[in-house]
Image (cartoon, grey):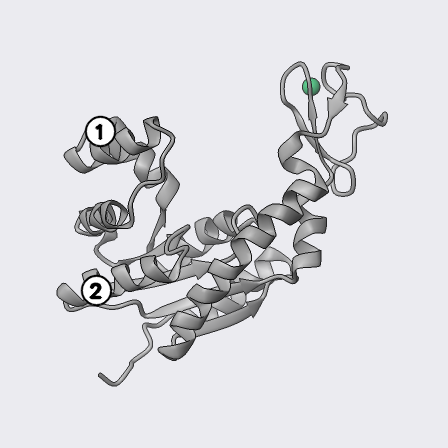
Amino acid sequence: MRVLVLLCVPGAGMGTQAEILAPRLNLLHLATGDMFRAAAELGTPIGLEAKAYMDRGELVPDDVTVRMLLERLAASDARQGVILDGFPRTRAQALALDLALAERGSSVEEAILIDVPPEDLVRRLSGRLVCRAAGHIYNELSKPPRVPGVCDIDGSELYEREDDKVETIKARLEQQLPDLLDVCAHYGEQGKLRRVDGRRPIEEVTEELVEALGQPSVRPG
Ligand SMILES: [Zn+2]
């Protein structure tokens, strides 16, 4: 079974990349956030365990996440392999994943970093505007409303959510980047890190990755 890890700062559109890439490589796209929600809805024991943490507003512990991941990997739709999206986010999680996969005689084949410079990320993530009436989404640069500050659809006021403000985005990046770099270093040490330039259009990045990853790479040992 192939296990690929997609790495990027959360919210930078990598989920979209993973969604497009997974079927092209005949792999299952496994976003850990979705996995938690699905397991909780199904009411599996591990799903309920994770839900209890989330309901208390706590982070799901790594060992619970890894156990859930392994359970998910055992399902028939993951037979060919998976692209992990949103996990691991820390070096500790990467180590836990290595250990769990090793017990099954498997390992991460490759970690792909969709590399976008922080200043580009800030630009990409900011400028989001939301309408008060129905939450319609606009972007000052890429999808501006016809009349500034007014929703095209219902005429209600557009505003910038606290989460989408440049200062908030910068603070979040500063908090997340060290962990991301740490995870990259972990896979780099194993010779398994592939960097792709994420500043290009998403289709171009997809094509490069399909070409590079279309066949399982053969690794000695
Ligand atoms: Zn609206």
Cα separation, mark 2 vs mark 1, equals 27 Å
- Kindly give the residue lying farthest to the right in the view shown: 147
User: Of circles 2 and 1, which is in front?
Assistant: 2
Q: Amino acid at mark 2?
A: Leu
| Quadrant of ligand 1 in image | top right
- Kindly give the residue lying farthest to the bottom in the view shown: 220
Residue 212 appears in view: no
Asked whether, in this view, residue 6 is left or right of residue 60, the answer is right
Asked whether, in this view, residue 71 is left or right of residue 82, the answer is left
Specify the label residue 42 is tagged with: 1
Q: Amino acid at mark 1?
A: Leu
Which residue is under mark 2? 99
**Looking at the picture, does residue 130 appear above or below residue 123?**
above
Q: Residue at x 75, y 15 (%)?
A: 156
Q: Residue at x 27, y 27 (%)?
A: 41
* Residue 20 image position (x, y, % from top left): 47, 52
Looking at the rendering, which quadrant does residue 160 occupy? Answer: top right
